[in-house]
């Protein structure tokens, strides 16, 4: 951007697609990264209803000042089917959370939730290769995290979900892309794992049930959250009391914004 950070005729446009839109947090972060990198680009919110999403996607193909967008609720699954190309992992997950417009107008999509989570661990000095991981959840962000943990080289991934059929379906999709992966179906007991991850929304509200059996946490475990509010969820409080190393939810967003900026070519 210019020194005064004004939008000009040369400014590249990025978006975030959601419905509703008022709650989204990403634009200030992406715009900060654009300034830090000296790029003349701006992210703005687009509130798009599900029924108009296909028409909007077609319009983006012809918008030559548009470089890409973050895709969030409720559009992640639908946008995956509207893209001209998606990554293999996004195809297996069945959703995208970022799209990029190529010079020829094609829309290319990917899912960076899981990669952002793994990058957050890495920045905190927590490598995952060779470690055994327990993941609570099989929907939403947990899908992407499961793929990213396998792609990051965990020795074993145990998926635990209240609806066991969803955990089994996620396991089959992972094995379809990574047939040699060691993926198991578990229960509420995280015993015997190096890394314990809550990939559910359980813990955002005080009345939520526990995502796993807190009594089974032991000091050698690393316990990680995807929830950002509250900062210290009941799981993290219990893990800290048990002597575990804890990893907060915010690094996932911070690192995902960096990955998204890279994806947009900032």
Image: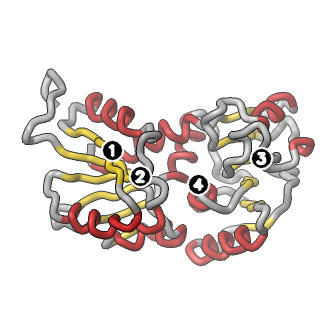
Whether residues under marks 2 and 3 lie with C-beta atoms below 8 angstroms apart, the answer is no
Q: Earlier in the sequence, mark 3 or mark 4?
A: 4
Q: Earlier in the sequence, mark 1 or mark 4?
A: 1
Image height of 6 relative to 177, above or below? above
Cα–Cα gap, marks 3 and 4 = 20 Å
Cα–Cα gap, marks 3 and 1 = 39 Å
Image height of 167 relative to 114, above or below? below
Question: Which image quarter: residue 207?
Answer: top right
Nearer to us: label 2 or label 4 = 2
Dot 4, crowdedness within 10 Å: few (<14), some or many (≥20)?
Answer: many
Cα–Cα gap, marks 1 and 2 = 8 Å
Q: Residue at x 85, y 35 (%)?
A: 219
Q: Label 2: which residue?
A: 18
Cα–Cα gap, marks 2 and 4 = 16 Å
Q: Which mark is residue 141?
A: 4
> As drawn, is 241 to the left or to the right of 119?
right
Q: Label 3: which residue?
A: 194
Dot 1, crowdedness within 10 Å: few (<14), some or many (≥20)?
Answer: some
Q: Earlier in the sequence, mark 2 or mark 3?
A: 2
Whether residues under marks 1 and 2 lie with C-beta atoms below 8 angstroms apart, the answer is yes
Q: Residue furthest top?
A: 4
Dot 3, crowdedness within 10 Å: few (<14), some or many (≥20)?
Answer: many
Q: Label 1: which residue?
A: 45
Cα–Cα gap, marks 2 and 3 = 36 Å
Image coordinates of residue 161 in percent, x first then y, are 76, 61
């Amino acid at each position: 951007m210019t020194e005064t950070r004004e939008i000009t005729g040369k400014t590249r446009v990025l978006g975030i697609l959601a419905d509703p839109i008022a709650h989204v947090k990403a634009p200030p972060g992406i715009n900060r990264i654009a300034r830090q990198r000296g790029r003349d680009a701006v992210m703005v919110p687009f509130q798009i209803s599900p029924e108009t999403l296909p028409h909007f996607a077609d319009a983006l193909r012809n918008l030559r000042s548009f470089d890409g967008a973050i895709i969030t609720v409720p559009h992640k699954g639908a946008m995956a089917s509207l893209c001209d190309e998606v990554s293999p992992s996004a195809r297996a997950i069945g959703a995208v959370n970022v799209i990029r417009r190529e010079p020829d107008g094609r829309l290319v999509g990917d899912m960076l939730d899981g990669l952002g989570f793994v990058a957050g661990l890495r920045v905190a000095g927590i490598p995952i290769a060779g470690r055994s991981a327990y993941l609570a959840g099989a929907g939403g962000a947990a899908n992407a995290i499961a793929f990213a943990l396998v792609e990051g080289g965990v020795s074993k991934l145990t998926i635990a979900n209240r609806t066991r059929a969803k955990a089994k379906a996620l396991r089959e999709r992972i094995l379809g892309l990574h047939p040699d992966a060691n993926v198991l179906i578990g229960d509420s007991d995280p015993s015997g794992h190096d890394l314990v991850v809550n990939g559910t929304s359980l813990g955002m509200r005080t009345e939520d049930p526990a995502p796993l059996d807190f009594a089974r946490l032991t000091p050698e475990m690393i316990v990680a959250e995807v929830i950002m509010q509250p900062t210290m969820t009941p799981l993290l409080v219990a893990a800290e009391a048990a002597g575990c190393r804890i990893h907060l939810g915010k690094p996932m967003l911070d690192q995902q914004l960096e990955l998204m900026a890279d994806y947009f070519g900032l």
